[in-house]
Image (cartoon, rainbow, N blue to C red):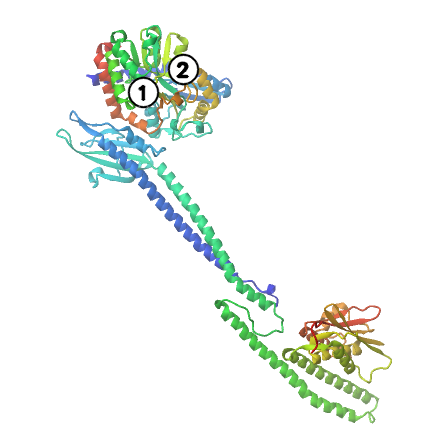
Amino acid sequence: MIRICFALLVAGFTAAQALAAESNKTLFPAVQPDAGTLTIYSTTDLVAIKPLIEDFQKSSPDVSIDYNEYLTNELNALASEACRKQEPLGDLLLSSSVDQLLKLANDGCAAAHTSPETLRVAEWANWRDEVFGFTYEPAVFVYNRSKVPPAEVPRTHVELADLLRERLDYYRGRVGTYDIRLSGIGYLLAFNDARQTTTVFGRLLESMARASAVARCCTGEILEEVAKGNLYIGYNMLGSYAYDAAQRHPELGVVVPRDYTLVLSRGALIPKGAQRADLGARFLDYLLSERGQSVARTNAFYFTESGELPPGVDGPQNLKESGVAQPIRIGPALLAVQDRAQRQRFIEDWSQSLIELNSPAWTRE
Amino acid sequence: MRPEALQHGPSLFGRLARRISFVLFIGAALLVSAAWYYAETAANKAYDRLLVGAALQMAESLSVEDGILTARLPTSAFELLGLADRDRIFYRVIDTHGQTLTGYDDLKTPTPLERAQDPLSVEEGVYKGEPVRIAHATRILADPAVSGRAYVIVAQTNEARLALTRELTLRATILVFIMSLLAFAGAMLAIRYALQPVEQLGTEVRGRDPHDLTPVTVDVPRELDPFVSSINHFMGRLNERVDLLQRFIADAAHQIRTPLTALTAQIDLLGTGKLDKAGRQHFNRVKERTSELSRLTNQLLSHAMVIHRADSVQLEPISLVDVARRAYRVAIPVTVDPDIVISFEAPDDRPLVLGDAVSLREAIVNVIDNALRHGTDQRLEVRVRASGTQAFVEVEDDGPGIPPESWEKATQRFATSKSREGSSGLGFAIAQEVANAHGGTLSFRARDERGFTVVLSLPLYRGVAK
């Protein structure tokens, strides 16, 4: 039964892909006479990347940027296919689903790039000088301040599980999280949650299932619904998007869990044989540079490895020093995440726990 | 012949240095190759363990669930492989039917799995165009639903191995290089040291007096003994020849003297009475030549005697004034031109020299004789004086003297600018020979308003006369 559902889903998703390919294209024309067009394939929301692209074009006014936005799984499918055919996809790939980028690099689809800027990248966020992590984004809880009383705001994973169990009726259908079948980043976070603490994750999954948690493809959707009050709590949201939404919707609260916080570093990769690999490298260097990082801190991704949490975020003072942060290391271990048997079974298990028990919620989608 | 004029053959040092460096170079190359080989083996061993470990972990993770073979690949297996942090990892899990369960479908072991003997293996291979190490592990399943052999193949690129191999080899190479350098420097020092006696021998032989034909007595290593004894043997033979030659000359001079004396007597008896003018002229010339011949014969004998005495006679302290005075008396003939003013000056303190009185007298006689014959116009002075550590016998005349450019030539045998006047040319040669034998010199002082001076200088004797 599940398999059929899954197959249907994949079929639908492939059809949606063609549609997405046209609708999510944004062109940033060069301010000065064109030196060339840098084609970026990315999973980052346009809103988040825009300040960075605009600032980049201030220092490189001769570069046009063709920005193509996809869901993580879509991007991965496109890039793998392109690599197989040896027709490089764009000049730079940006994906929050670093496990997919790592798999691509492992399959020989990436070109190495070294520069003074890449030397600044932390060791855990650089693999073979091919995949670089350029952000520092904790996975956070979000909640609606008017719906979740201050006393109930969960600050650890266990508290969240307990809250859902204790106030089952109140939170039924009001908790949202990634649909890991659709979102590569959701899968990556869930897999790492499972690795962190098998028992807590199991409990949490069970609680969410009982509370008929809602699974959505993207952070944005969940954030919107939490802001509106349709959902009360969002689990495993990317900190950067959550904080951005919280700034626009004051009723949105952001909690950095105090027991452990998965930290994701958005990955960048230059495809092997990219036509304008030089421009790709230039933009990558910009992202890693002091200037790019500072723009990212103030306008795009807000959280940094060394600095304090942005104001208004509930959590430990400093992620790194508190020892709570668990960065997802960009390394071969991610290949285990990307193993297809592993993935299939993990998603089956997850679907079985979360979705099948709530098939009414699932069919309503 | 001077050593500089010799054609320089390849130096012994250079030859040894070249050969030793060649041997060291070959040795170093062999060592570096061996180091590289061992480093590669070590790196392969180290990283093969990770590879096999990962393959075993993966094989261990295979399990049968609900009658289906499933693989739960442990993250730790990948983390283990990730210790080679830059290497790409490929894997494939094959079920009991030979179907790919998960991983890279086209990954194969170089040796087909069906033919693999061992449950574990590590081989070299190529995957996706990259050289890789490929390991496989076998899992034998005996579940009622699934039974047979399942395989796990894990491959890893070679970057970490190469990096480790390079690093180990580089370190070994630095060590080998340093050792070679030390060995080379040591060898060079040793060769220099070993060749020192050769240098010393050369200096000793080169620094010898040309007349010194006595055996060389330098301490040399055993290896140089044949060389030294050859030199000594040759010198001995040369000495014998020289002795023979000198004796022959002395004998010849002696033998000639007797008939010459008779000849002189006969000529004197012949008289000039019956001769016409031309005949008298001829007669006088014969007489002159005969006396010249007898003087030459005497000089030859005196030369031979001087040389002989230089080798054989023990030197003793003598008064230079006495010797000079005696020579003065012998050298000035009674028949000397009475118009010539002749004087002899000597200090009161009678300087002593260590010498052979006979040879010294002969030397001074020759110098005075020479001055009388070729120099003196109206005045001849013989002076003995001492100054500092030297004693001098000076013979000064008012003649034209010898121009400085001819001084060197003047002391050579049978060389003179005035051969027509019947010089034998042996006078200065004898004087110099004697001076040298006494550690002194024969020199000339350029003509001034007083005259031209020949100076025989000898070291003063500081001891007490016997």
Question: Which picture quadrant has residue B122?
Answer: top left
- Which amino acid, mark 2? Leu
- Which of the two residues, B455 or A18, is positioned nearer the viewer here? B455
Residue tagged by mark 2?
A46
Q: Is residue A201 left or right of residue B97?
A: right
Q: Are marks 1 and 2 in contact (CB under 8 Å)?
A: no
**Which corner quadrant holds the C terminus of chain B?**
bottom right
| Looking at the image, residue A31 lies above or below residue A249 | below
Q: Quadrant of the N terminus of chain B?
A: bottom right
1 or 2: tag closer to the N-terminus: 2
Is residue B157 visible from the viewing direction of this image?
yes
Residue positioned 29% across, 30% down in the render? B76
Q: Position of residue A101 (x, y in %)?
A: 35, 25
Which of A75/B297 is in front?
B297
- The kind of residue on which mark 1 rests is Leu
> Relative to A177, does residue A117 appear above or below in the rendering?
below
Letter of the chain that mark 1 sits on in the rendering: A
Camera-nearest label, 1 or 2: 1
Q: CA distance from mark 1 to mark 2?
A: 22 Å
Number of numbered tags placed on the structure image: 2
* Residue assigned mark 1: A189
Mark 2 neighbour density, 10 Å: few (under 14) some (14–19) many (20 or more): some
**Residue B399 coordinates in the image, percent (x, y):** 82, 74
Hey, which residue is sitting farthest left in the picture?
Answer: B144
Q: Residue furthest right?
A: B339
Q: Residue B13 placed where, x, y %?
A: 51, 59
Is B410 rendered above or below residue B11? below
**Would you say residue A42 is visible in this rendering?**
no
As drawn, the label of residue B134 is none
